[in-house]
Image: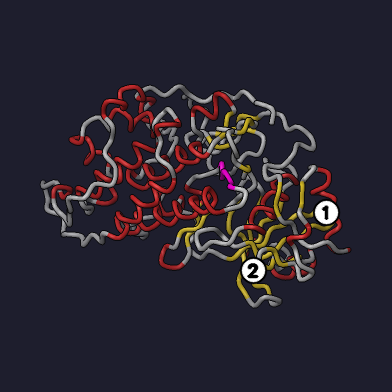
Amino acid sequence: MGCFGCTGGSSRESESIKNGNGNTNSIRRKKNHGPGVGSSACPKEGAKNDQFLSDAKNLNLNCDWKKVSKSGKSNGKEVLEFSFEELIATTRNFRSDCFLGEGGFGKVYKGYLERINQVVAIKQLDHSGAQGIKEFVVEVVTLSEADHPNLVKLMGYCAEGNQRLLVYEYMPLGSLENHLYDLSPDRKPLDWNTRMKIAAGAARGLEYLHMEMKPPIIYRDVKCSNILLGEEYHAKLSDFGLAKVGPSGDDTHVSTRVMGTYGYCAPDYAMTGQLNFKSDIFSFGVVLLELITGRKALDCTREKKEQNLVVWARPMFKDRKNFSQMADPKLQGQYPTRGLYQAIAVAAMCVQEQPGMRPTIVDVVQALNYLSSQEYVPNKPVHGTSASSRGNDNNNTCFEVNKSNEKKHCEDKGITETANEE
């Protein structure tokens, strides 16, 4: 696929595809386009959240109010409504020393909410940014229904006037992206065990969306910047503004506008607008490759043939002799050889070009749960010796790359900017 001019950032586009380095290739926004999640619980009715109800109504959102009690609880989970004044006080009027970062939705601030006695992260919608009311409503609706240890918890929201804010549990270690790239000299890179733990945790969160949510949800935005880390590197998926209800019955896909991030977006979805659960699997495979290689999904600072991670990796999958060259140099050879092979095999299956050949999330979780359970005890690197030939290996294999099918998938067909109507 093509590579566009590179700038910093990793924000998400709601009505567009952006490249992995932050530049946007816009598709004009269509007003009042229906949200991705069409049937779910919403916050309780009441005078204070009339603005939220108005937002949902304007988007033709089908809210099932019977699922929500007068206490504001949905499926036993309470989603609070906060006043803008309360959030101003929490962030000390959004002071710069409370600033955590910025994404497609807007700026994120850290604060302490006395009402719930908890440190939180607060995202404030930037109306001039990539996202809007639609993503705000979909995020609230999706997380009101979700309850899983590998999904970030939505504490509440604010909808007053033109202000839209989301309040989440605070994830002290930030995003996975911040632990893989552009590390300062005093920061220690993630070790092999931690990488496999993060991969397994993120996969379990995706499994919950695909297999346990009712109706099942396609996440549509799997990427390193959306995987947040808590204490002991506990991984949680975040940012559900692009979430979409998956196909049901005999349907194999849902037709939708192409939305996502260059480098992560499945080529079949990008070219046809046909979205299915295997679209998420491709994106997850890219994240797994990032964890293994330490390379960005799309990196315009590299030589042209190495800019796209999947395009670079596919020829490498053909021969195990290449696998040690794929390992992140920051690991300094400290990884189990067979564990590396198995992890690469899982990633290779996930990023196959044909969606039908990718594994289900259940298979991925089973493989990564196994890999994360095999603790690797690092050895001291020996100068001039490949440390990848040492380590705690075992003879179990999670996935074997299907070599007869691999040859069909060594060319990347690129990403198209064509918008398909939902």
Residue picked out by circle 1? 53
Chief secondary structure of the magenta portion:
loop
Residue 415 horizontal/vertical position (percent)? 52, 25
Give the amino acid type for the residue marked by disc 1 in the picture.
Answer: Leu
User: Mark 1 or mark 2: which is in front?
Assistant: 1
Up/down of 44 relative to 287, above or below: below
Q: Is residue 82 left or right of residue 220?
A: right
Residue 367 horizontal/vertical position (percent)? 33, 50
Asked if residue 328 can be seen in this view, the reply is no
Residue 380 horizontal/vertical position (percent)? 16, 59
Residue at 49 percent of width and 28 percent of height: 267
- In the image shown, does 55 or 26 lie closer to the viewer? 55
Residue picked out by circle 2? 111
Give the amino acid type for the residue marked by disc 2 in the picture.
Answer: Gly
Residue 361 horizontal/vertical position (percent)? 44, 46
Which residue sits furthest right?
47
Up/down of 82 relative to 272, above or below: below
Residue at 59 percent of width and 41 percent of height: 246
Start-end of magenta stretch: 216-220
Up/down of 354 relative to 20, above or below: above
Residue at 83 percent of width and 58 percent of height: 160
* Quadrant including the C terminus: top right
Q: Tell me the distance, in whole angstroms, between the alpha carbons under discs 1 and 2.
A: 26 Å
